[in-house]
Amino acid sequence: MAALLHRDEKEAPPDGSVMALETVDMDGATSPQDTVLDTVHAKYTEDEYRRVLKKIDRILLPLMWVCYGTQQADKTAVSTQATFGMIKDVGLVGQQLSWLTTAFYIAYLVGEPPGNYLMQRFSVNNTLFICMFCWGVVVLCIAFVQDFTQIVALRALQGLFECTISPAFLLITASFYISREHPMRSIIWTTANSGFDIIAQLVMYGIGNAAKRHESIFGSWRWISIFLGSWTILLSFVALFFVGTPNEVGWLSKKEKHIIATRVANNQTGSDGHHSWCWDQVQDTFKDPQTYFFFFTVIAAGIPFGGTAAFGNLVFISFGFTNLETIVKGIIPLDLLAIAWLLLGGVWSLKKPQTRLLLMTASTIPSFIGMLTLGLLPKEGLLWTRWGLYLMLATGRLPAVLIWTLLPSNVAGRTKKSVTSAIIFIAVCIGNAIGSQTFRAEWAPRYVPALVICGIMYALQCILFVLWRLHCKFFLYNNVHPLT
C-alpha cells in the first residue's frame, strides 16, 4: 500500500542516512540525535550482520520472553486464584469476577494513548521500567484486599500500568530486526504467554499444594499475588538495564548500534531514536483499509481469549477436575500445545512469509470445531472428550500473535506504527472486556452459551482473514506487496 513506504518527515534526512544513535558533545559525553550516521554508504559484511544478530537474539529475546510472560501471568492470575478461595474470601458474587477482567481492560484502554505518547516522546526503556515497577506493586497489594471494591480498583490500576509492554515490545522488535525477521522474533517472545505460564502455574501449584497441607487464614491465592508481585518488581530493574531500543541499551557497542541502524534503515521498516509527530501519517492510518482489518479481527480474537483466560480454570473444574488437577492436567497441557503450534507457525511464516494470513485462517478452524462441539455435548460425563475438545483452543492462539507481526512488517513510519498500534490495543481491550462478560454467572458451572459464542468468534475471524487476504491480493496500491 502507499502508506507502507511513507516515513516520518524527520525520521531520515534527505540524503537517505538516519539520525545518529550517539554523538559526542564538548565534554566527551554522548547524546542522541545531534549528527547523522551514513547508513547508505556504510559497508558491513554478512558475518558482521550475523554476529550482531546473534548477540541481539542471545541477550534481548530471553529478557523480552520473561518480561512478556510475567505480565501475562500477572494479568490472568485471577483465573487460578478463583479456584483457590479468592471468590469466597473477597465475597465475589454475580458478575463481579468478570468485572475484575473487564475493569483491567477498560483501564488498559484508557492508559494506551498516553502510554504510546510517552514512549514516542521520551524513552521506551524508562517508560517500561516505571510501568513494570508500578504494576508489580499493585499485584503485591492484591494479596491484602478484603472486598470487591478494593480488588477491582487494584485491577484497574494494574491494567493502567500494563498497557505499555506490548506496544513497547513491538517498537523494540521493529528497531532491532528487519521485516522478514519480525514474525519469528515476535512469536518467540509472545510464546511466553504459554511458556512462562507453565512456570507460573507450577509455582502456583506448589503454593496451593502447600496451603492445602498447612491451612491458614492467609489463603493460598494471596501468596500467589505476593509471589507474582515480588517477581515483577525484581524483573523491572533487570528490564531497566537491558531492555530498550538500540539507542537505549548499554550492551551494544557504538559500531554494533550503527550496524543495526544500517540494517533497519535499508529494510525501510523504521529506525531508532525520538521523532516528531507527523499528522499526515495519522490521516494516512485511517485511510488505510488494513487498519480496519486489524481492528475487527483483533476484537474477534480478543473475545474468546479474554473469556477463556479469565474462566478457563473454572471450565476445567466443571469437567470434573479438582483445582490442583486443573493446573497439571488442564492448563499446562493447553500451554504446551499452544507453544508447539506457535513455534510451528513461526517457522512456517519464516520460510513462507507471504502465507501468514492463510496460516491464521487455518488456525481458527480447530478452535471453532472444539468450542462448538463442547457446547453441544450432553450435560454429564465424557470428561476426557471435553478435555480434548477444550485443548483445541491451542491453535486459536496463533492468529492473535501473528496479527502483531503484520504491524512492524507492513506499516512503515514511526508515527503510523504508533497510531496503528494504539488502534490495535483499543481492539484488544474491547475484545477482552467483552469476552470476560460473556461468561455469565447464571451460566455457571459449564458456561455452555459462552463457549458457543467463543466458537462463533473463531468462525468470524476465519471469514475476516479470508477477506483480508483477498484485499491484499486484488487491491494493492503502488505495487507494494504487504508481507501477508
Image (cartoon, grey):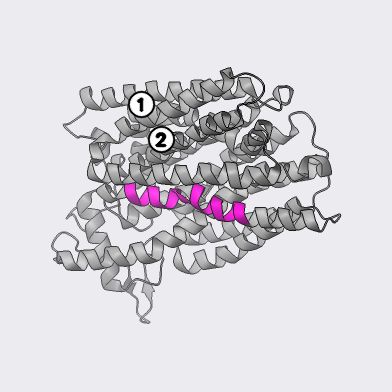
Question: Is the residue marked by circle 1 packed among few (<14), some (14-19), or many (20+) residues within 10 Å?
Answer: many
Q: Residue 61 is drawn in which quadrant?
A: bottom left
Q: Is residue 409 visible?
A: yes
The residue at 49%/26% (across/down) is 370
Q: Is residue 425 left or right of residue 134?
A: left
Q: Which residues are magenta?
A: 183-202
Q: On residue 465, which mark appears?
A: 1
Amino acid carrying label 1: it is: Phe
Q: Earlier in the sequence, mark 2 or mark 1?
A: 2
Q: Considering the numbered disc 1 on the image, is that residue within a helix, a strand or a loop?
A: helix
The reply to whether the magenta stretch includes residue 236 is no
Residue labelled with disc 2: 399
Q: Considering the numbered disc 2 on the image, is that residue within a helix, a strand or a loop?
A: helix
| Quadrant position of the C terminus in the picture | top left
Query: For this rendering, which residue is in front, 396 or 425?
Result: 396
The residues bearing labels 2 and 1 have C-alpha atoms spaced at a distance of 9 Å
Q: Residue 382 appears at what percent x and percent y?
A: 60, 27
Instruction: In the rendered view, tell whether residue 344 sits above or below residue 436.
Output: below
The reply to whether the magenta stretch includes residue 185 is yes
Q: Residue 32 appears at what percent x and percent y?
A: 36, 66
The residue at 52%/44% (across/down) is 333
Amino acid carrying label 2: it is: Pro
Q: Residue 462 is drawn in which quadrant?
A: top left
Q: Residue furthest bottom?
A: 27
Q: Is residue 171 left or right of residue 147?
A: left
The reply to whether callout 2 and callout 1 are in contact (CB within 8 Å) is yes
Q: Residue 190 appears at what percent x and percent y?
A: 44, 48
Instruction: In the rendered view, tell whether residue 261 sits above or below residue 296.
Output: below
Instruction: In the rendered view, tell whether residue 294 sits above or below residue 183.
Output: above
